[in-house]
Amino acid sequence: QVQLVESGGGLVQAGGSLRLSCAASGLTVSSYAMGWFRQAPGKEREFVAAVSWNGDNTYYSDSVEGRFTISRDNAKDTIYLQMSSLKPDDQAVYYCSWNVRTVFGEFVGEDNWGKGTLVTVSS
């Protein structure tokens, strides 16, 4: 059974930084593209970033491009999201996902979500 455990969220001031981690079990992480999604209160879950199986290729939503960096450590079955220059609009619950791919031009992951980690950005 696939389990994803996100961590690293917290309260940060606007302009600050956080590093999120996602530990995966029940799958061979190195076989899949992995990614991060987020969901703000009252909004739908949205794509944030993705990384190819070997880490060679990364993809970002326009809203985080240049501020967030996704990375992975296949030996640890873990992916990361380094977030910098945080804005109040970044406030959300962040989830990681596996087998991230595009469907009709949109990034999607497997419908197998962890509990997520809450990022709160104060202005």
Image (cartoon, rainbow, N blue to C red):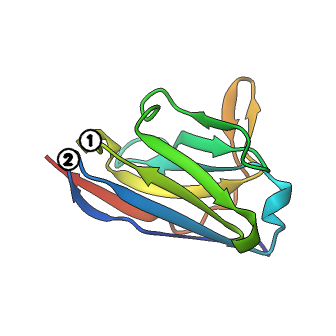
The picture quadrant where one finds residue 105 is: top right
Q: Is residue 118 above or below residue 91?
A: below
Q: Is residue 16 above or below residue 6?
A: above
Residue 106 on image: x %, y %: 66, 29
Contact flag, marks 1 and 2 (Cβ < 8 Å): yes
Q: Identify the residue shown where x is 48% and y is 41%.
A: 44
Residue 4 on image: x %, y %: 64, 69
> 11 or 72: nearer the eye?
72
Q: Identify the residue shown where x is 68% and y is 41%.
A: 108
Q: Is residue 1 above or below residue 100?
A: below
Counting other residues with Cα less than 10 Å from the Cα at mark 1, is it few (<14), some (14-19), or many (20 or more)?
A: some
Q: Which residue is mark 1?
A: 87
Give the number of callouts: 2
Counting other residues with Cα less than 10 Å from the Cα at mark 2, is it few (<14), some (14-19), or many (20 or more)?
A: some
Q: Residue furthest left?
A: 123
Residue 113 on image: x %, y %: 62, 62
Q: Which residue is mark 2?
A: 14
> 101 or 70: nearer the eye?
70
Q: CA distance from mark 1 to mark 2?
A: 5 Å
Give whichever of discs 1 and 2 has the lower sequence position: 2
> 73 or 11: nearer the eye?
73
Q: Is residue 65 left or right of residue 35?
A: left
Residue 67 on image: x %, y %: 40, 38
Kindly state the secondary structure of the residue where label 2 is placed.
Answer: loop
Q: What's the residue type where badge 2 is placed? A: Ala
Q: Quadrant of the N terminus?
A: bottom right
Q: What's the residue type where badge 1 is placed? A: Lys
Query: What label does residue 78 carry, if any?
Result: none
> 23 or 76: nearer the eye?
76
Q: Identify the residue shown where x is 44% and y is 65%.
A: 117
